[in-house]
Image: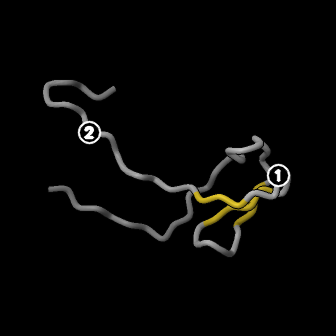
């Protein structure tokens, strides 16, 4: 069984996933959220996990 490691570090996005603009600022709520100055949306970047490679196949 693999161990899950959590971090409090904030993932830094390079652009807004909704409008594509790059003027992003950390938002105070919710935790680890980003605010887009152009479209005014607030979003969170989160890693869900790593995909498992089926036995006998090589990861690319």
Q: According to the image, label 1 marks what residue?
A: 39
Which comes sooner in the sequence, label 1 or label 2?
Answer: 1
Q: Which mark is residue 52?
A: 2
Residue at (23% x, 61% y) in the render: 3
Which part of the image, by quadrant, shows the N terminus? Answer: bottom left
Q: For residue 44, which quarter of the picture?
A: bottom right
Q: Nearer the viewer, mark 1 or mark 2?
A: 1
Residue 56 image offset from top left, x and y in percent: 14, 25
Residue at (48% x, 71% y) in the render: 8
Q: Is residue 50 left or right of residue 20?
A: left
Q: How is the image coloured?
A: secondary structure
Which part of the image, by quadrant, shows the C terminus? Answer: top left
Q: Which mark is residue 57?
A: none
Residue at (29% x, 29% y) in the render: 59
Residue 2 image offset from top left, x and y in percent: 20, 56
Q: Is residue 53 left or right of residue 56?
A: right
């Amino acid at each position: 069984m693999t161990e899950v490691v959590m971090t409090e570090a904030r993932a830094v996005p390079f652009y807004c996933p909704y409008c594509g603009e790059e003027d992003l600022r950390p938002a105070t709520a919710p935790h680890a959220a980003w605010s887009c100055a152009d479209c005014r949306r607030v979003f969170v970047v989160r890693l869900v996990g790593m995909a498992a490679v089926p036995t006998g196949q090589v990861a690319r």
